[in-house]
Amino acid sequence: MPRASTRAPFPFLVADAQHRPSDDPIFALNAEAQRRARAGESVVNATLGALMQDDGMLAVMPCVSEVLRAVEPRRAAAYAPIAGEPGFLSAVIGDLFGNGELASWSLAAATPGGTGALHHAIVNFLEPGDALLTTEFHWGPYQTLAEHTRRRVETFRMFGRDARFDADAFHGAVQRQIATQKRALILLNSPCHNPTGYSLDSAEWDEVVRVVRAAAERAPVALLVDHAYAKFGGARANEWVEHVAPLVGEALLLVAWTASKSFTQYGARVGALVAVHPDADERRRVTNALSFSCRGTWSNCNHAGMLAISSLLNDATLRARADRERDVLRAVLDERVRAFNAAASGAGLAYPRYEGGFFVSVFTPAPEKTAARMRELGVFVVPISGAVRVALCSTPARDVPRLVQALAYGLEAAGK
Ligand SMILES: Cc1ncc(COP(=O)(O)O)c(C=O)c1O
């Protein structure tokens, strides 16, 4: 057996990679919650970003597993086209825009989930060193993706004094970016924003459009709608489309589409980046750039996953079945949301308008302290800057009163 040398003469990792944090902090908290539960403690684990049934098992849509199993083995085993299965890409575009004008101006590239779509947007619409722009509360991996691709993240205040989307802060931030980096890539996650749960309403989308339009007169601006939770946003979840439609052509509209949440199929890694522009030459350039990025990263995506999801989107019967199965899951989630709103308003918690979705954030001046105090009571939430994130997607309605009590206790500890 060769003797291992303990000598470490050279750093093998390049400088940037030497001090990366290890486990995602959310997974670390989840591991602690699971360890304590296994040891026999009664635990409420509101940390995870996946929809769980009330019995703690992962919620899945049976039709998705069935259709995945039915994919013809040789088709599944073959390489998919670099930019994705054409039938899958058109199904995603149809899912977003039906068959109207926006659909005819759309192109798409397949990506591993919404994460891959965000990656392609960052590397193709920002120069190295540039910053993407998003809300101060945002999904942590935006930062990882930006750093990993040698870009940065800049943020603007998300909520104004009226607890609504702060369009003035947004306007100021975009204009500053246009002045400094001469382009902007804006990431807005709505409906059901992670981590706050906020969904922009019609008036707020109109404000967004006003701000983007003004910026797009001065420089190339790409507005990316992070659509991760859209199918849990209720009846008005798609209203944003009619609001942003007039922007198309002035700004580049991008959508990060994913099957992870909408088909409760996180593991198959099925997603797409959709871009909308009326000019065919622009579309051709963007198509080529995205295809090049696919080849230069993951080469091509999960073939079986794409074929299965396209059947679920294209076949009317399967689509109706998927909608019904999702409705059942959404009803479970909506019950938790109602329970939370009812208990939290009585407990004096400060949190944004919450109409549905996987998460809500409760504001606190000392997030770490609040979360640590809650853990003493066996209740796990994720501390983030300025708040703790509460995953109702993994909390049964029966546990919501205990969760809210723990939040109130944790906030007391934080001096609120
Ligand atoms: C806001 C947001 N965007 C995008 C994603 C991407 O998820 P996936 O890559 O699984 O589609 C997530 C997943 O948690 C998310 O919360």
Image: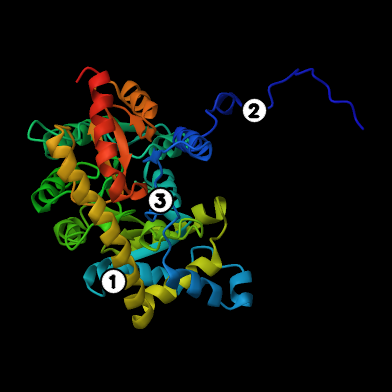
Residue denoted by label 1 = 104
Three-letter amino acid code of the residue under disc 1: Ser
Mark closer to the observer (3, 1): 3
Query: Label 2 neighbourhood size at 10 Å, few (<14), some (14-19), many (20+)?
Result: few
Tell me residue 158's x, y (percent). 20, 35
166 or 249: which is nearer to us? 166
Which residue corresponds to the image point at 21% horizontal and 36% vertical from the top-left? 174
Q: Label 2's element?
A: loop
Q: Is residue 364 visible?
A: no
Q: Give whichever of discs 1 and 2 has the lower sequence position.
A: 2
Find residue 50 and name its label.
Answer: 3
Residue denoted by label 2 = 13
The residues tagged by marks 2 and 3 sit, at their Cα atoms, a distance apart of 33 Å
Farthest-out residue, front: 40
Three-letter amino acid code of the residue under disc 2: Leu
The residues tagged by marks 3 and 1 sit, at their Cα atoms, a distance apart of 33 Å
The image shows residue 375, relative to residue 264, as above or below, that is: above
Q: Label 1's element?
A: helix
